[in-house]
Amino acid sequence: MKPLKKVKELLDKLSECDNPNEDIEFELRRQAKFSRAYRINCTGDVCAGDEIVFVRRRWGAYRLNGKTPFLCYQIVEGKVVKESYGRQMQQHTFTIETKDGMLRIKGRNLYAIGVWRRPWKDENARKKVLEEKHARGDKARMARLRRIAAKINDDFDVYI
C-alpha cells in the first residue's frame, strides 16, 4: 500500500510535534491501527457520514516576511458531519467532528496527502449520498459558468 508507506515516512518527521511526550514508535503503532480500521482510500471522494483518517500539515504563526514556518504533520481522525460548496469559487469545505471538537477544512487541504475511511455498514446508502453530493457539485459548477458567461457578455456589450 503506497499511501501507508507515504504516511509512515511523514510520521518519521513527527519528533517535535503534536505531543512531545509520545515517541515515533507509538505513532507508528497508532498508524497500524488506522491501517486496519480505515482501509479504503477515498482521496477525492469523501462524503458526509464517512469516518475518516488523514494527515494534515501544521503551520506556525504568520510572520511579517510572509513565510509561515512548517511545524509538523498531524494525524486527524474523525467523522464528516457536513460538506458544502462555496457559492463563488466552489471551494469544497468539510466539517469534521474529532475528539477535540469540530474542524472545518477545505477539500484541497483534506485531499492533499491522502484520506482513508472505514467501510459503511450499507455501502449503497453511501452511494446515494455521493450521487447527491456530485449532483450538487455539478449544479454549482454550471451556475458558476453561467455567471462567468453573463459577465463576459456584459463586458463584451460595452465594447460594441
Image: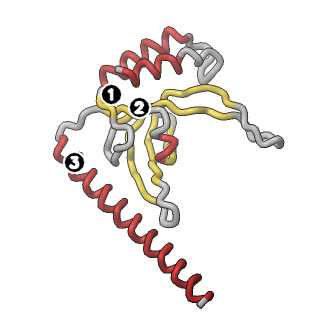
Q: CA distance from mark 2 to mark 3?
A: 20 Å
Who is closer to the viewer here, 103 or 153? 153
Counting from the top left corner in percent of width and height, residue 134 is at 31, 56
Residue at image location 49% in from the left, 56% down from the top: 91
Residue 104 appearing in the image: no
Q: Nearer the viewer, mark 2 or mark 3?
A: 3
Three-letter amino acid code of the residue under disc 3: Lys
Residue at image location 35% in from the left, 43% down from the top: 46
Does 139 appear above or below 71? below
Residue found at the very far bottom of the displayed protein: 160
Label 1, residues with CA under 10 Å away: few <14, some 14-19, many ≥20: many
Answer with left or right where residue 77 lies relative to residue 12.
Answer: left
Residue that mark 2 sits on: 53
Looking at the image, tell me whether mark 2 or mark 3 is earlier in sequence order: 2
Task: State which quadrant residue 84 falls in.
Answer: bottom left
Counting from the top left corner in percent of width and height, residue 144 is at 45, 69
Looking at the image, tell me whether mark 1 or mark 2 is earlier in sequence order: 1
Three-letter amino acid code of the residue under disc 2: Val
Residue that mark 3 sits on: 127
Q: Secondary structure at mark 3?
A: helix
Query: Is disc 1 in contact with disc 2, using a CB cutoff of under 8 Å?
Result: yes
